[in-house]
Each structure stands twice: as structure tokens, then as C-alpha cells.
Image (cartoon, grey):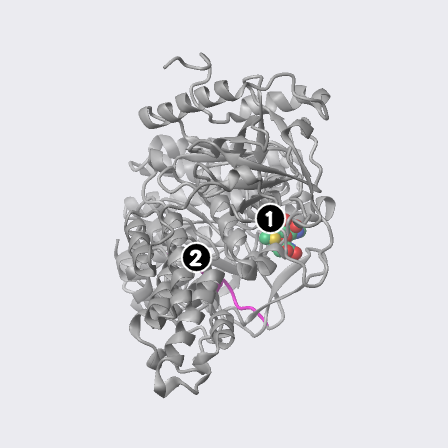
Amino acid sequence: MARPDPIRNTYEEFPDELKELLKTGQNEMGRNPSTVPSRDILLHNHEWHLKFLVESAMPARNFVLPPAYPPSRASASEAKRVGIEDLRIDLRNPNDFILLRAITGPYVYSSTVTIVEGEYGQAARLTVCNLEDSIIDPIIPVGSILAIKQPCWSRLPTGSYHLRVDHPSDLEFLNQADGGVPKKWRNTEDVEENKDAATWKKDGDVMFLQKRFRKALELYNRAHARAASSLDVAAQIDNYRKRCGVDLVLLRFDAAAYDLSQAVSLYAKSNPSLFSSQLTEPSIIEAWLHNRSTDDPLNIASILPRPLKGLANRIKFDLAIYQTTPKYNLERISSYVGPLTLHMDVANYISDAEIKQTQHHGRGLFAARAFRCGDLITAEKAFALPAYLFNDRSTECSLYSLGDGTATDRAGALLFKELVQKLRHNPSLRESFFDLDDGGYWKERGWEAKEGDDIPVDVFRIEHIRRRNCFSAPLRSLDLLTIPSPVHNGFWIHSSYINHACLPNSARTFIGDILLLRATRDIAKDEELTSQYVAPELMYEERQEKFMGTWGFACDCTLCAVDKTVGMKLEGERMAIFEDLKSVAQRVGSKPTVRVLKRFTRRLRDLEALFVDNTYAKLPRLCLVHPTLFLTEAWRTLKNVDKTIGSATNLLRYFGIITSVEEERFKVLENSGLVNVETLRALKYMAEGYDCKGRTQVAGQIRKVASVWFRIITGADLGIDEFMRA
Ligand SMILES: C[S@@+](CC[C@H](N)C(=O)[O-])C[C@H]1O[C@@H](n2cnc3c(N)ncnc32)[C@H](O)[C@@H]1O
């Protein structure tokens, strides 16, 4: 087959090409497209692309968001139907819709591409973006009848034009029997019309086993329709149960709750001992599945048969449940986590961290009670955390937002996709998600929702919210101490309300999909909770650029307030010595000598001298940290105990943690909140040193503090002994 275009070998979108088009495309807006290929050419090209998709090594997937526009809010009854001939380039009328029929199988990779026809046979290429689609279980199989809201032509880099849908809610699937569907699209005979419920269900099971979940859902729907009319209660229960299972795989938790409540109600009605119980009432069961509580007033755990109970459990955890105590067996949970078991069945504990308005930083989290250093403040399961096993081709992808010029890698791109699916399918989850900070996007682009309105699922708003509120997460923070762990990008709604401070009072860690927030110093009731979004850069300007670039704020914490006054000249002098020391440390590596370390110490003193005045009294001196860590470890390598202890004490000091040892008592006198792996190492080296000197009481007290800090930076106690021994 001849290649339709010698330059492009796939339908894939390349962000650089699209960016160029944006620059040149403005003057076409509102015009008719100059060229649209004929139906035959479109079909021929599509066939070629399908063949190419099957046969070749594909590039990494590029998910591309064009400049933002809101989804249509017109309902079917308000919208005006238009034809392909009415469409213009880049001109979306939110009140228009078009009816189209897919005349080919789809090309599914970064987006779904298919060829569609209008009522009078005019063909066009349709690109549907941001849906979770697969070639074996396509969302838009041939013959699908689609209503597309606010349709318009969009330019392609090939010089041609296509119809493009970015918001899932701008695409609706119609049945042949739906009003408005052209007569000639209704004539497909359903040759399988006479199958009974059991056969449909069996066919659904086959599809389920083949992981064709959308097809399975369609077949279970058919089985359900049949079973409902045959009044076979057992078959109906079974169908609801099966459909509930597929719902869960497809992230349709609201639908799963509905299906299970129907199944339970039918089960109760057909069971004499439950006939008069509340379990016969589907709305009560559905409300319980959604109520976010661990309570079981209907006694479901003991009454229901296992398969229904198991599904109830699954739905409750997927919709999130809450407990009011910080009680968890985190060591056990931590031991379960692995690449295949990232999602843990635990309840959230967030009741002691309240969301309130701050004075200058929007909303924030506040301590509802006092916490001691190391205490668990919250434990929250991820709202979304895509798991991928390997960094292989099957998951290789990126997300580009052309409108605001941002790009994100695989972890962020996969999270974006999952968020879109979860919000698309589950209206009950939208309110809490869309209440998060979107940097003013919706205020500028959207509209005020009225009481009872559906919250629109705007993909651009989702991406704005993702960027400002997501967290990077290893499988377990514990693993970061030893081996590089793949970093995922996840979403935790309650934890998103915490504001940043370079000197925070709490730190987050991860055990699977649980985000744990622990106090890094003592916190008073009603104090605002803060954590570091990222560890602060050494240079004040660089630090602020990072905060401004990603989150749109300039940090005004106590450290930034002081660093701001330092001035470029002094900062430059500090950085020059820092760079000097860094290159010596790199040269020396793990083979230090006493002579080199003495010279290193003298140069380090030059750097210390640049902090002489009292402005940094109890504050961290960040550019002294890394050279001092090097020095501490180097003295330890040379087995110089006193120098190791002295240098480790300085290391803590430069992190803003002031300690003392008096009369065999070790004390933390000041704690800036910068508890991290380096400060933990400093404690470990100090404890070893005091042991060597025979001062085991001091060493024991230091180890006690270290065990609390270990819990802060890994989430739990698992692995503390190995760490302290290594
Ligand atoms: C993850 S949200 C935190 C919750 C947010 N304050 C709210 O009202 O939803 C991140 C946003 O909070 C604000 N923020 C966080 N830390 C801040 C800080 N130290 N100073 C100023 N604004 C901050 C910024 O607007 C940032 O984009």
C-alpha cells in the first residue's frame, strides 16, 4: 500500500509542529477549510495508518492539549444541530452539535482517530483526545453514532483539517433508536436479538476475561435488559454483580455503587430473613456505599454473601473512607507494598488537620490539636496514583499544554489521563476535586455553577489543578534510603491544601498510595501546617523562580525573608566558595586524607565567616550543609571520632537544628523543622561516635531521637535497625 504522506508515518501529533501551526493559524479562524480530502482518500489513508499502527514500532505517545476552551454546557434539547458543511476553522459555537457515524474501525494510540460521515455522506477525520482507549477494546467502534458538541475544523500539520474533541463531555454516544438519529443509520439489523440473558452474560464473561471491559459492559447491559424482563431474580443479581465488577475496573465507582445496591436489594428481597430489613432499599445501600464512614449499621459485613461483601468493600475503599484515629499497622502495610501492590486498603485519617483560610496564602491546613515531633498528622490514600511497572515503551508518554507552554513527563501524563477518566465517570467525586486551587483558570474561563448543576469536567482545568496540587511519590519513602525507586505522580486531595514553607513543621512520606504527614517539630493547636513542596534551592532567586514557575507564589517564610536581604554580591561570594568546596569533594570522593580535610576545613571556615552576623542565629545556612556532610563522612572514613561528632553537630546546626550534650544528656534545643535524610545521618554518625568513646548513654539518647526522625522520613519504623547499623 502506498504511503499517503512521505513525511508523516503515523497519525501521531507532534507538539512542535502544532505549536508552529498555532502561530500561523490565527488568520484562518472562522474560514472554510481550503482542502478536505474526499471520502475515498480519507478511507484509504486511514487504512494505511491502521496497518502502520499494527506493523511498526511506534513513537512515545504525545498527549497534546491545544489552547484552552471550556466544554459546551448546552444540553441536547437546547443545542442546535449543524452539518459538516456548516463547520468553520477553530470557531466553536458552544450551542451547536453535529451527528456523525463512524465508518471505520479506530486508530488508537495517543488519541483515537476515526473516519466519520455526516447524514449526507460527507466524510471527515475525527480525533478524540483524552479518553482511556485501547485498540482491542475501542471506545468508538465502527458504526458508533456520535453527537459532538461545539464542533469545528482544526488544522493539521499535513495541511489538511480534522474535527477534534478535547473534552469527553463534548462527545455523546447515541443509540440507533434515539431521537434525531437519521433513518438510514437505523437500519442495521440486530441478528443477535433473540439471545437470552444467560448467553449475553456468558459473552460478557468472555470479553471480561479477554480484558475487553467496555465490550463486556455492553454485553452485561444487554443481559441485564433481558433478565429484567424475564423476572429471573438470580440472573438479575448475578448481572448486577458482574456489571459492578466491570464498573470497578473501568473506574466507574458511582455506577458500581448503583449496581451493587440493586444486587443487594434483590438479594434481600428474595431472602425471607432479610425481607423486612433496610437492605431491600437500594437507596439506603447506595447512600451507605457513598457515606465515607467505616461504620456498618446495616451489618453488611456479616449478612451478605462473600462476593457481594467483597464488592461493597472494594467500592467503599475506592470512594474513600475515613477514621478519626491515627491507628495503623504501618510496618505491616509497608511490607505489602510492591510494584504490583501499590494501592492499600486503608481508611484515611485527616480529622486533625482542618482546612481553613490563611491570612495571605489562600486556604491551608491547620492543626486541630497539638502534635509532638514525629506524630502522625494525616494519613491519606491517593485519589489517583497510576501504577506502571516498568519504564518501558508501553507506558512511554508525555503531555504538552500548548496554550501555556508547559510539558510534563510520563508520570504526570499518566496521572492526567487517570484524573480525566475518574472525574468523567464519577460525578460524586467532582466537587472535592474541582474545589482545589486551579490558579484562577476557571474563574477566567468558566462560569459560575448554579445549585444542583453538574460540575463540568474541563480537561484544561484538570491539568491546571494537577500541576499545582500533585505530588511525586516513590513506591515507599523507605526505599529512597537505599535504592532508586520509580517516581510516580499522584493526587491526594486533602493533603493538597497544605501550603509550602522552606522551614516547615511537617514532612510527607509515602507507603504505597498512602501519603503520611508527620510533625517535624512540636506543633501547637491551631498552628498552620506547612511542608516543603521541593527542597529549597541554595540561591534565593533560583528558589523563588521555581516556586513562581510551578505554583505562582513567592515564598515569604522566615528563611526567605532573611535570604532576600543578603544581596547578590554576598550571595555570589558564598556560591563561589561553595562551588570550590564541591569540586574538592568530588575530586576526593571516598578517599580522603587528613591533609586534604584540613585544607577543606579552612576553606569551609571562609564560607562560615560569610554568615557571621546574627541574622541567621537559629536559621539554617543551606550552602554550608553539603560541604559539612562531606566533611563529616570523610572524618568518619578516617575513623576520627571527635572530628566526626563535631562535624555532625555542625551539620545539624547548618540545618537549623541546635543540639547539646551536657552531663551525659543529649538535647535538641532548636529545631527548624528540616528533618531529612542528611540530619538523620548526622545523628547516626554522632551515636556511633559516642559509642566509640564509651558514652553509651548519650549514644542511646541520640538513637532515640534518630528513631523518631527515621519515622518522619520513611513513614514507619520498618528498617530502622538496618539503617542505623549500615
Ligand atoms: C497546593 S495549593 C495549596 C492550597 C492553596 N493555598 C489553596 O488555597 O487551595 C498551592 C497553592 O497555594 C499557594 N501557596 C502555597 N504555599 C504558599 C506560600 N508559601 N506562599 C504563598 N502562597 C502559597 C499558591 O497559590 C500555590 O499555588
Camera-nearest residue between 413 and 615? 413
Q: Secondary structure at mark 1?
A: loop
Asked if residue 464 lies left or right of residue 703, the reply is right
**Mark toward the start of the polypeptide (1 vs 2):** 1
Is residue 28 at all visible to an observer of this figure?
A: yes
Disc 2 marks a residue whose amino acid type is Thr
Q: Which residues are magenta?
A: 509-524
Camera-nearest residue between 696 and 622? 622
CB under 8 Å between discs 1 and 2: no
Q: Which mark is residue 179?
A: 1
Residue 546 point in image, percent of width and height:
59, 40
- Residue 720 magenta-highlighted: no
Camera-nearest residue between 198 and 35? 198
Residue plotted at (41% across, 49% down): 386
Asked if residue 500 lies left or right of residue 257, the reply is right
Disc 1 marks a residue whose amino acid type is Gly
Residue plotted at (57% across, 22% down): 156
Q: Which mark is residue 217?
A: none
Q: Which corner quadrant holds the N terminus?
A: top left
